Amino acid sequence: MFKPKAARIEALEAAVRSAIGHAEWIETVRVSEQGRATIILRADPDDLAASEARRMEAESAARSVKGIAEAHAALTAEREPAPATGTRRVRKGARLSEDAISQATPEKRDGIAPIPNINRIIAVTSAKGGVGKSTVAVNLAAALAKIGLNVGLLDADIYGPSLPTMLGTVEADPRTGAHGKLEPVEAHGMKSLSIGYLTDPDAPMIWRGPMVMSAITQMLQDAQWSNGETPLDLLIMDTPPGTGDAALTLAQRVPLTAALIVTTPQEIALADVRRGAAMFAKTAVPVLGIVETMSWFEDPMGQRHALFGEGGGSKMAASLGLPLLAELPFFTEIRAGGDAGIPAALGEGPAGPLFASLAASVIAALDDLDVKSAPKIIFED
């Protein structure tokens, strides 16, 4: 008859400890009701042979314990290093050491070379996915092109390239011209490139920062965005969502003129906006302002419904010291235009004037950057 589980674990730990010599190597000991023992030992990365010897000894010792039907021991990938002298583990409300902060500080953007024939690059960003960032990027670019600017649109959202669908260019096949550079796809009065033009749409994009940056650099540097006589006035860049490896690498390595941040009104999205704003502040990229999407839904009786909350974008903009550039409601034409490949900014419906107003606000904010310093983002306690 098996011993009670607690007693078996105690006996097992004692046997393993005796066999390997020190309790500090033991990470986890488990025993199932059927008497199967699992032992996890901490590995010593400086002496893997000794770690393996301990594993075998622990396994043998476990099998000798009464009530253990079978035993398996495994090693962790590496032993967790002890905290350095003078530092503590980070907990909520804790402060990082100065050394840790210096190691985590993003690279400075000094000395980033401009892209030939592109006057300004604006990153359309979001601190989380699913907030309508790509919709804003496409319609902003279309609105800017509609008023006569020479506009390019770069889909740098490697993990979810939606630009080909939203521009109606899914079947496009960019070619390399006589000059040896990739020819952007022209649609709706603007030039576009997307990783979606160059990859299998069903293939997963399991890329980290360096691979993402390599692909984006190629689309920036090795593309014929202009013939040299008429450079792009603006390149709108739809960036990967979040503040992870890919987004941070872009902020550090691309000569961005400025960024704008897209969010929805609810608190869970706004919490991430602060992280995105902090990333741009640390990489010295000016933020033009906040664009709130899904602000409200208007029913057939003309009654507005704030499905995702109300006023979140304006409150966040005020707390960060940034302007709220637009509040974009649910409009069927915006969704339908994206699905059909015809940006709603080019249509005659109510979404057109909203995107035209956003384009005007962006131009005004860019003009302000030319005559005064970028707004300083404020983080209030």
Image: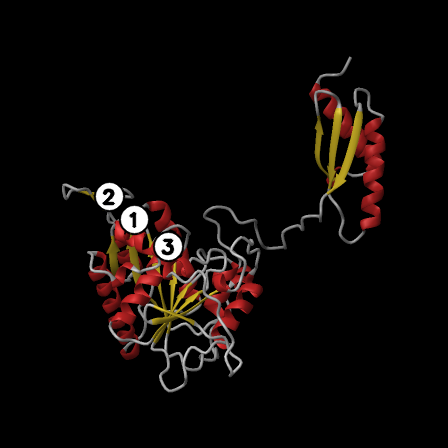
Nearer to us in this view, 241 or 95: 241
Q: Which residue is mark 3?
A: 273
Residue at (27, 67) in percent of width and height: 143
Alpha carbon separation for disc pair 3 and 2: 20 Å
Q: Is residue 304 left or right of residue 48?
A: left
Q: Earlier in the sequence, mark 1 or mark 3?
A: 1
> In this rendering, which labeled residue sits more in front, label 1 or label 3?
1
Q: Is residue 289 left or right of residue 41?
A: left
Q: Are marks 2 and 1 in contact (CB under 8 Å)?
A: yes
Q: Amino acid at mark 1?
A: Pro
Q: Residues within 10 Å of mark 1 (few under 14, many from 20)?
A: many
Q: Which residue is mark 2?
A: 306
Type of colouring: secondary structure
Q: Earlier in the sequence, mark 3 or mark 2?
A: 3
Q: Amino acid at mark 3?
A: Val
Q: Which residue is mark 1?
A: 265
Q: Earlier in the sequence, mark 2 or mark 1?
A: 1
Nearer to us in this view, 238 or 47: 238
Q: Is residue 188 left or right of residue 42?
A: left
Q: Is residue 81 left or right of residue 314?
A: right
Q: Secondary structure at mark 1?
A: loop
Give x and y (percent) for residue 130: 39, 50
Nearer to us in this view, 375 or 255: 255
Alpha carbon separation for disc pair 1 and 3: 11 Å
Instruction: Tell me if residue 66 comes above or below residue 182 in the rendering.
Output: above
Q: Secondary structure at mark 2?
A: loop
